[in-house]
Image (cartoon, coloured by chain):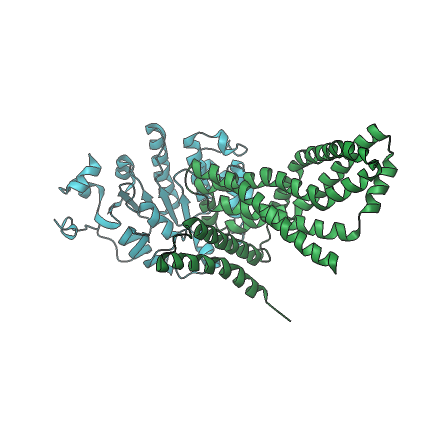
Chain colours: A green, B cyan
Amino acid sequence: MINISRQGMILIIYTVPNSAYLWIYNCRDMHGIKGISGKVAGFFRLSGELSRFAGRYFAEVWKPPFEIRELLHQCYSVGNRSFPLVGITGFIIGLVLTLQTRPTLQEFGAVSWIPSMVGISIVREIGPVIIALVCAGRVASGIGAELGSMRVTEQIDAMEVSGTNPFKFLVVTRITATTLMVPVLVIFGDVLALYGSFLIEHLKGNVSFQLYFNQVFNSLEFSDLIPDTVKTFFFGLAIGLVGCFKGYYCAKGTVGVGTAANTAVVAASMLIFILDFIAVLISDIFYEL
Amino acid sequence: MSRENTITPVLPVREAEEEVVIRIKDLRKSFGDNHVLNGFNMELHQGENLVIMGKSGSGKTVMIKCLVGLMQPDSGSIEVMGKDIIKLDRTALDLLRADIGFLFQGSALYDSMTVRENLEFSLRRHKERFKDRADTETLVLEALKSVGLSHATALMPAELSGGMKRRVALARTLIMNPRIILYDEPTSGLDPITAKEIIELMRIIQARYRTSALIITHDVDCARVISDRMILLVDGINYAEGTYRELQRSADPQVKAFFK
């Protein structure tokens, strides 16, 4: 049985991408392999730095002081202020998905399958991914820009000099807040998406609220909910991690702040797709078992 | 002419009992091939105002950041009140930092907090230090009063002028009752009148609180008014040292260029 301690895991997270970067870099220098461009080496270097940043987060999140007040403030900022955007997005997804699929299913006389189909697709895939992408756009860019401007205007240095650990105060609280709040936002978005779908069905097919949601919940299993909720924690972690990483190590100047905000969204979105793919692979293994 | 022969450092005669609060020896720092500090040496005495002048890129800001542990030097030693800050752990460094005030070039006020919260933030990690002193409210008001901004507690940094920001930043430094204050370009970006006000405020603070001050500046007027002693930093080393008058009278072209 493999037993790796927390320090061991952190060491692996630190070492693997850095080793890959060094290996590629050495290959390029020593053997003149032109095909491996600097971008590939750069990608591994960035992965190494990001994984080191993640390792530092996991090492510091358990240590006092816990900055509870700042954490609650960030939860409010990430969660409460995202509710309108996530709510509208979820509601429209539900409306559009039902409107788009209804004519096709009607052709096959399968309109009664709409609640099941919409329910499964929203809860298992569309809801978590689209809501996480919306959060990446709103939250990761906001964190990247905020921390970036704090770095550029020396506010992070001022915090360090005042005796407050800026990593704990700014980074740990934000990553924890996104990790906790993105799942809540996804559940909220899913509920509104299903309600939007129900409204269309109610208007076009005169389906009652009870009938619609009975069908939705009959088609969903417990095994649908758990992996798809668990993966949203990882989406939240990725959003916070990338936003903080880009902002915390922002280059000097206003261009650096803009770049931090922009690349935070792009990198967080990519990471969400990668994590989603991994989550689907893992949950498929459990389904087969 | 070799650099070693340009000017013989002339240090003011000091009393033997005058305590050295900062001692930097052979400080070196490079960024890749860019050697910013090349063996910088310095001593700051208790109650002294030491001005460090130098062109942009001469290593002034890097030196001051090494001094408070924001950057790690490549070699050399930095002793602050007898403690080698390079060897201190995080907790000990934070405790030491409470004795060092740092006025940043752009004021570096936390822009999501009010003036009051900016000042309170400095106190939050050092509650033990102030347990015998008045409550936080009184400390904040006292610090703001000493910079003439006792009415500004509820304002946000975005609502303040450049001069007011610099004063609030100074109040944030003073609230910790530091023994040493480091000023990074305290008058840069200010109009001449506001700059004079800030210089005067620095003088008043130094007289009232008996702090030692290390001032990095390009402003010759500021140096003239406030300095007990000056160091001219060129290419990361002490190019010349002395009082304002001594350096002003120097025949060395590099030194003269600063006083034109």
Say which quarter of the image contains residue A282.
bottom right
* Residue A75 higher or lower than A89, as above or below: below
Q: Quadrant of the C terminus of chain B?
A: top left
Q: How many marks?
A: 0
- B184 with respect to A221 (left or right): left
For the residue pair A180 and B233, the one nearer the viewer reads as A180
For the point 26% across and 41% down, which residue is it?
B55
Q: Is residue A136 visible?
A: yes
Instruction: Please identify the residue farthest to the bottom as the structure is shown.
Output: A1
* Residue B177 higher or lower than A30, as above or below: above
Percent across and percent down for residue B200 are 34, 35
- B110 with respect to A105 (left or right): left
For the residue pair A130 and B51, the one nearer the viewer reads as A130
For the point 44% across and 44% down, which residue is it?
B173
Instruction: Please identify the residue farthest to the front as the structure is shown.
Output: A108
Q: Is residue B18 visible?
A: no
Percent across and percent down for residue A156 are 47, 45
Percent across and percent down for residue A23 are 43, 60
For the point 47% across and 39% down, which residue is it?
A259
For the residue pair A221 and B15, the one nearer the viewer reads as A221
Percent across and percent down for residue A120 are 76, 44
